[in-house]
Image (cartoon, grey):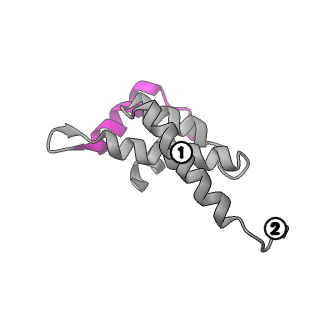
Amino acid sequence: MARLAGTARRHVCENSPQGVAVRELVQIATERGRLRADLLEAAAAAELGGWQHSSTSYWAGEQTALLLVAAGADRARVEQLAATTRAHLANASGPGIGHSA
């Protein structure tokens, strides 16, 4: 999952053509001849949820998630999983350095 997210983020940062990026992501997410959409969805949800939680910290998250959707992740499932990511991040953002009590 980390490799998928990192590869998608790299393509977003490099402004790669979508076809090139999608081909590489599909290659990474294919296992024994079968596309693992669940892996694409998990990676996309982590990126999208992070971006929705903090668009500054996860500035490329939305575009990265969209690229993973283009590679085969189900958009509805990604949005559902992203809500869980947002909740985890919100709970982790308790009082501490940079956070008010």
CA neighbours of label 1 inside 10 A, class few (<14), some (14 to 19), many (20+): many
Mark 1 or mark 2, whichever is nearer to me: 1
Q: Please determine whether, in this image, residue 58 is positioned above or below residue 20.
A: below
Give whichever of discs 1 and 2 has the lower sequence position: 1
Residue drawn at point x = 42 percent, y = 28 percent: 70
**For the view shown, which residue lies furthest in the bottom direction?**
96
State the image coordinates of residue 27 (x, y, percent, origin top left): 28, 39
**For the view shown, which residue lies furthest in the left direction?**
32
- Nearer-the-camera pick, 47 or 95: 95
Q: Which residues are magenta?
A: 13-30
Residue underneath mark 1: 82
CB-based contact (under 8 Å), mark 1 and mark 2: no
Residue type for callout 1: Ala
State the image coordinates of residue 5 (x, y, percent, origin top left): 46, 48
Total residue callouts:
2
- Nearer-the-camera pick, 93 or 13: 93
The part of the image, by quadrant, that contains residue 2 is bottom left
Residue 16 is inside the magenta segment: yes
* Label drawn at residue 98: 2
State the image coordinates of residue 78 (x, y, percent, origin top left): 47, 39
- Nearer-the-camera pick, 31 or 14: 31
Q: CA distance from mark 1 to mark 2?
A: 24 Å
| 27 sits left or right of 83 in the view | left
Residue drawn at point x = 71 percent, y = 45 percent: 55
